[in-house]
Amino acid sequence: MRLTLSRSGGFAGIRRPPVTVDTGDLAPDEAALLEKLMSDARFLDLASHAPTPGQADRFEYTIEAVPDNGLPYTVTIGEADAPPPLIELVRKIEQIAKRKK
């Protein structure tokens, strides 16, 4: 599965370039952790775009998940509305992407 994360907003309202992680390139335990976090967050049950009233200095996340044998699904959600496992997923994707630079 390929996961692409985009983050915008925050203090300066800056949109960072998206980062992509492919679970096929990861150690099995790390890939399993990403899939568990997606399951715990009920990723596929989240609305594709959850409108959030403007909140100063908060982030908005867009995560696109492309399964190896399935249709892509994209979720855009505000930081304040994201379930804790989704925030943990965001942090893990960022950590893996940073390590791969």
Image (cartoon, rainbow, N blue to C red):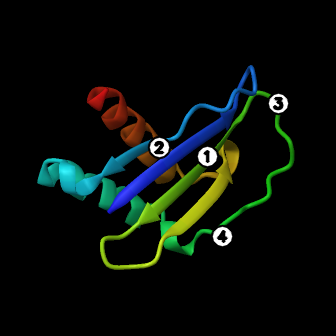
Labels 3 and 1 touching (C-beta < 8 A):
no
Which residue has dot 4 on it?
Answer: 47
Q: Which type of secondary structure does the marked residue at label 2 adopt?
A: helix
Between 54 and 25, the residue placed more toward the observer is: 25
Give me the C-alpha separation between circle 2 and circle 1. Answer: 8 Å
Give me the C-alpha separation between circle 3 and circle 1. Answer: 15 Å
Q: Identify the image quadrant of residue 97.
A: top left
Give me the C-alpha separation between circle 4 and circle 1. Answer: 13 Å
Q: Which type of secondary structure does the marked residue at label 1 adopt?
A: strand
Which residue has dot 2 on it?
Answer: 90
Residue placed at 47% from the left, 43% from the top?
A: 90
- Name the N-terminal-most of marks 4 and 1: 4
Q: Which type of secondary structure does the marked residue at label 4 adopt?
A: loop
Amino acid bearing label 2: Val
- Name the N-terminal-most of marks 2 and 3: 3
Q: Position of residue 46 (x, y in %)?
A: 60, 68
Which disc number belongs to residue 61?
Answer: 1
Which residue has dot 3 on it?
Answer: 56
Amino acid bearing label 4: Ala
Give me the C-alpha separation between circle 2 and circle 3. Answer: 20 Å
